[in-house]
Structure formats: C-alpha cells, structure tokens
Image (cartoon, helix red, strand yellow):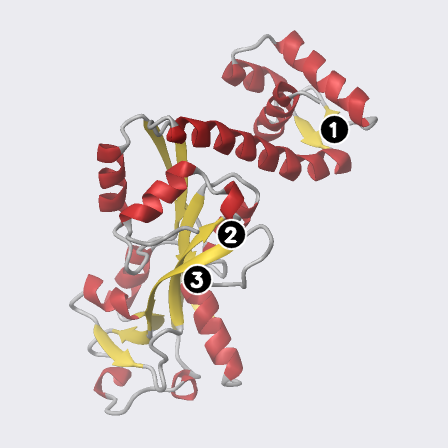
Amino acid sequence: MELRHLQHFVAVAEDQHFTRAAERLLVSQSGLSASIRALERELRAPLFVRTTRRVTLTEAGRALLEEARRILAQVRSAHEAVAAVQGVLRGTLSLGTEQCIAGVPVAGLLAAFRREHPDVEIRLRQAGSGELAEEVAAGRLDLAFAYRTQEDTDQLRSVSLAGEPMTVLCHPDHRLAAYGAPLTPRDLADEVFVDFHPDWGPRRVTDTAFAAAGVRRTVALEVNDVHGLLDLLDENLGIAVVPRHFRDKRASLTSLPLKDGDETAYETIALLPPVQATSPAARALMGLLGTASD
C-alpha cells in the first residue's frame, strides 16, 4: 500500500467526485481512478459506490477513511518533526476552536505564531466541542481549543487551560434581574431558554447541571453563534446559562450567579493527539500559551 493511494482515496472520499478530486490533487482522472482500483485490489474490497453524479463510501471505505486520515497525519508529523530538528518549522498548523474560548486569545495567539513561524501555513475552523474532539482524534486537526466534554482516550488527550463558573444572563427588565439570592436550576424551571447547539460545550455543561438537579428545561431558541445568543437576550426573549466571561461581552445584560457554582466546573482545554503523534507546530503553539504539550 502506497501513501499516494491513501492520499488519493481520502481526496475522493472528501470530494465525493473523481473529477474534482483529480483537479485538487493535480493528477489526471484516469491516474486517480487507477490508483483507487489498485487500492481496492490490494484490500480485496470495493471502497466506493460509483454513480454518474457522485461517489459514496462503502462500509469498507468508511472503515478505511479514519485510518487513512490518521496515517497521513502521522506521516505529515514525521516530516515536520525532521524539519523542526533541522531548525525550521514548516508544514501546516490545523487548529479548531469553539467561539469565545475563555483564557485563549485565539486571534492574537495565531498572530504571534505566524510572526515566529512564517513558513507554517495556518488553517482554522470553528465547530462544537464534540466535533472538534472527533477531528483531533481522527488526525484531521493538530489540536483544538474546546470545553471538556469527555475523559481522555488512547487517541485524544487534554491539557487544562482555564476554569470558571456558569452564570445566568438576562435582560435587566426580566423578573429574575431583581432576584436577590443566587439562583438554582429549580428557580429557572419555567423559564424560556436561549442556548447553543447540543454539541457546544456551554450547552453540554448546562444540560448536565439541570439533569443532575432533576430539572427538565426546554431550549426554545437555539443558535450557533455567541452574538446571536446575546442579541436574543437583549430583546428579552429568554434567559441563558453561560460561562461567566460571556457577561463581559454585553454590558446591557444582567448577570446572576448560579448557586454553588464550582470555579472549575466549566473547563477550557486544549485537545491534542497522543504525545508521540503531536505535531511540532502544535507543540510550538502550546508553547506560546506557556503550557507544555507533553
């Protein structure tokens, strides 16, 4: 099995089209097709279901895809490690992040990284913490800044970066704004909630807290961006339970403490592959945070 066969396979799987994949790889379509056929012969299994409009993965193809991505990521890390030993950091830094991560100034961090390592291409994408964990474990991201949603595994480890309690945000005219004592989930049982997609860290933390208190809540207004959530609160359309640093993003809103909030209950982490698979670029970025990646 040759690495180029795996590279060709992953490209076709991602594009779901031989012509587009060939154009991206700068190879002929006939050469790409021949490469995929050679891989299928070696594995003794069809990897794609081909139609006139698109190709889709077979069960064997789906099984191969994650392993192929992981192998290619490890090969890339090996090349970058050798370059790093020679004193030059090259290659690509693929970073994932949730919006408004506490304790990590992502834009400033990447600017500092570019100044120190101008030969490294930076790629950034935003997603929910659950998806980011899957991307790092599969080798599609070098690292990600997220919220802790799971324990470490053989393919994924975490480095703690910051912790903070959750807080309730509401409009100053909302009835809760005049509440004198810290709030509990039971105090919020009948409220209309604004919240993020279930894959986002803040939503997971809040859902877990309410479930532990035996309180059922309904998220009536679901958004996928921080400013959208704050805008809805500004119009007094509901309340939200969010990490404490969100209160600094909209001075017009009222912030209320959540009773018995643990200072480390909401934890911002860096998600990384195993130490031996961590790329030099990821190590360098963590170094700029003043945090060891080993």
Identified at 21% across, 78% down, the residue is 173
**Residue 46 point in image, percent of width and height:** 79, 27
Identified at 27% across, 28% down, the residue is 118
Who is closer to the viewer here, 99 or 264?
A: 264
Identified at 27% across, 38% down, the residue is 113
CB contact under 8 Å: marks 1 and 3: no
Identified at 27% across, 84% down, the residue is 175
- State the quadrant of the N terminus: top right
Q: Which disc, if any, is residue 47? A: 1
For label 1, the SS is: loop
Residue 103 in which image quadrant: bottom left
Report crowding for label 2: few under 14, some 14 to 19, many 20 or more residues within 10 A (C-alpha).
many
**Residue 167 point in image, percent of width and height:** 31, 75
**Residue 207 point in image, percent of width and height:** 48, 72
Report crowding for label 3: few under 14, some 14 to 19, many 20 or more residues within 10 A (C-alpha).
many
Who is closer to the viewer here, 129 or 109?
A: 109
Q: Which disc, if any, is residue 133? A: 2
Q: Amino acid at mark 1?
A: Leu
For label 3, the SS is: helix
**The residue positioned farthest toward the left in the image shown:** 251
Q: Which disc, if any, is residue 201? A: 3
